[in-house]
Image (cartoon, rainbow, N blue to C red):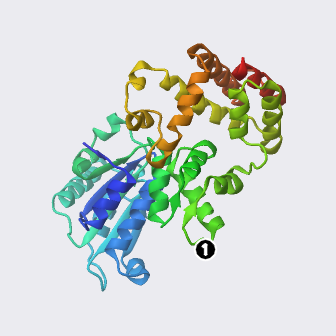
């Protein structure tokens, strides 16, 4: 069975320099696959020249199993190792006749049983369903398969990814990234790199919540945190004014919908008897608050006391309806009017 692996797991593996002769990386998180390939190169080669002269990249639609075996069977040049990367392995070209295809399958199977130890062969693919993985040649790759699944926690990934680059994200920065950036590794990785460039030569190597607001969210005087406070205080006039200001700057209701959906889902979880019995550490994990984000658990608990379970369920229903309207699934409504109606629903 394929190993489901995180970035930290791979870092540990590569630090131990346990490099296998064959890897099969597949799944939705193509950014993590690329990061893993880059990390592999730093372990395999001592410099860029060695890497360039001993790395071969093939593309599935343009190659065959026989060509992959041929490339993998060549010896390295002035280096201990050679890297062969096959991108889009799921699209690998089939031969014109059944006989030739069977011969190439047999050749590939034989190579996997006895790979050249000076070559590291990395096969990469997108998401594959279970039925596809039960077919040849995937069945032969089971022991060397790593599935890159969607992130369970964007904040946890962001914290680890920043640390790899030598930077620290404050709890506020993690929270703001969670709100304003998507939950995919590519989006988070890209934004963290932008934030590091934004922070420049900062001595303490720390990214703050304000950095995220300034460089990512582009929200200054009026933001969702001010809106959250106004909604918690049931101040309809103030909440409406802030929401309209945010809408004016963003030109879409999406940031408000995304933030408050997460906010009210967390409040809903805090109403669960099972979560109420948990320790703070376990409750934080249940809410998707990892690492330094546990700092915000008390804040969520305070807010949970201000809303009944009925209030929370009505808010989530209103947010879901707004989301459907934004996506065009429900009849399109003027977004400014949608802002006003949504705020009223969240407060009522």
> Where in the figure is residue 103, as x and y percent of width and height?
23, 54
Q: Quadrant of residue 250?
A: top right
Q: Single out the residue that lies furthest toward the left.
A: 114
Image quarter (top left, top right, bottom left or bottom right) of the N terminus:
top left
Q: Residue at x 26, y 77 (%)?
A: 75
Left or right position of 151 against 310: left
Q: Single out the residue that lies furthest toward the bottom.
A: 78
Above or below, 123 relative to 246: below
Left or right position of 181 against 6: right
> Where in the figure is residue 329, as x and y percent of width and height?
68, 24
Above or below, 114 relative to 159: below
Q: Quadrant of residue 107?
A: bottom left
Q: Residue at x 73, y 42 (%)?
A: 223
Left or right position of 170 against 133: right
Above or below, 212 relative to 288: below
How many residues crowd around disc 1 within 10 Å: few (fewer than 14), some, or many (20 or more)? few
- Please state which of residues 151 and 243 is positioned toward the viewer in this rendering: 243
Image quarter (top left, top right, bottom left or bottom right) of the C terminus:
top right
- Please state which of residues 347 and 47 is positioned toward the viewer in this rendering: 347
Q: Is residue 21 visible?
A: yes
Q: Single out the residue that lies furthest toward the top.
A: 310
Q: Is residue 93 visible?
A: no
Q: Residue at x 45, y 60 (%)?
A: 34
> Where in the figure is residue 179, as x and y percent of width and height?
61, 42
Which residue position holds label 1?
A: 201
> Where in the figure is residue 222, as x and y percent of width and height?
77, 43
- Please state which of residues 86 and 196 is positioned toward the viewer in this rendering: 196
- How many labels, in total? 1
Left or right position of 9 against 48: left
Check disc 1 and report its element: helix, strand or loop: loop
């Amino acid at each position: 069975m394929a190993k489901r692996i995180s970035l930290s797991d791979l870092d540990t593996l590569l630090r131990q320099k346990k490099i296998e002769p064959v890897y099969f990386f597949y799944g939705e998180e193509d950014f993590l696959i690329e990061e893993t390939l880059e990390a592999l190169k730093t372990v395999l080669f001592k410099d860029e020249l060695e890497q360039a002269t001993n790395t071969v990249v093939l593309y599935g639609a343009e190659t065959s199993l026989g060509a992959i075996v041929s490339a993998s069977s060549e010896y390295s040049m002035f280096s201990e190792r050679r890297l062969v990367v096959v991108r889009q392995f799921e699209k690998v070209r089939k031969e014109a006749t059944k006989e030739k295809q069977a011969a190439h399958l047999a050749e590939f199977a034989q190579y996997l049983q006895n790979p050249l130890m000076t070559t590291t062969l990395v096969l990469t693919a997108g998401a594959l369903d279970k039925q596809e993985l039960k077919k040849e040649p995937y069945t032969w790759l089971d022991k060397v398969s790593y599935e890159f699944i969607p992130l369970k926690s964007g904040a946890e990934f962001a914290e680890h990814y920043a640390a790899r680059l030598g930077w620290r994200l404050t709890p506020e920065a993690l929270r703001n990234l969670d709100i304003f950036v998507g939950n995919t590794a590519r989006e988070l990785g890209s934004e963290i790199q932008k934030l590091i460039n934004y922070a420049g030569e900062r001595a303490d190597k720390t990214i703050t919540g304000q950095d995220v607001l300034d460089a990512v969210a582009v929200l200054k005087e009026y933001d969702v945190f001010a809106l959250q406070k106004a909604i918690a205080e049931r101040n309809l006039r103030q909440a409406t004014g802030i929401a309209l200001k945010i809408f004016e700057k963003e030109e879409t209701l999406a940031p408000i919908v995304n933030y408050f959906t997460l906010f009210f889902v967390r409040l809903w979880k805090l109403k669960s008897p099972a979560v109420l019995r948990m320790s703070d550490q376990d409750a934080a994990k249940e809410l998707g608050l990892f690492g330094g984000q546990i700092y915000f658990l008390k804040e969520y608990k305070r807010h949970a006391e201000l809303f009944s379970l009925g209030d929370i369920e009505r808010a989530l229903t209103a947010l879901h309806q707004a989301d459907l309207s934004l996506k065009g699934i429900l009849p399109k409504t003027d977004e400014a009017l949608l802002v006003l109606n949504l705020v009223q629903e969240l407060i009522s």
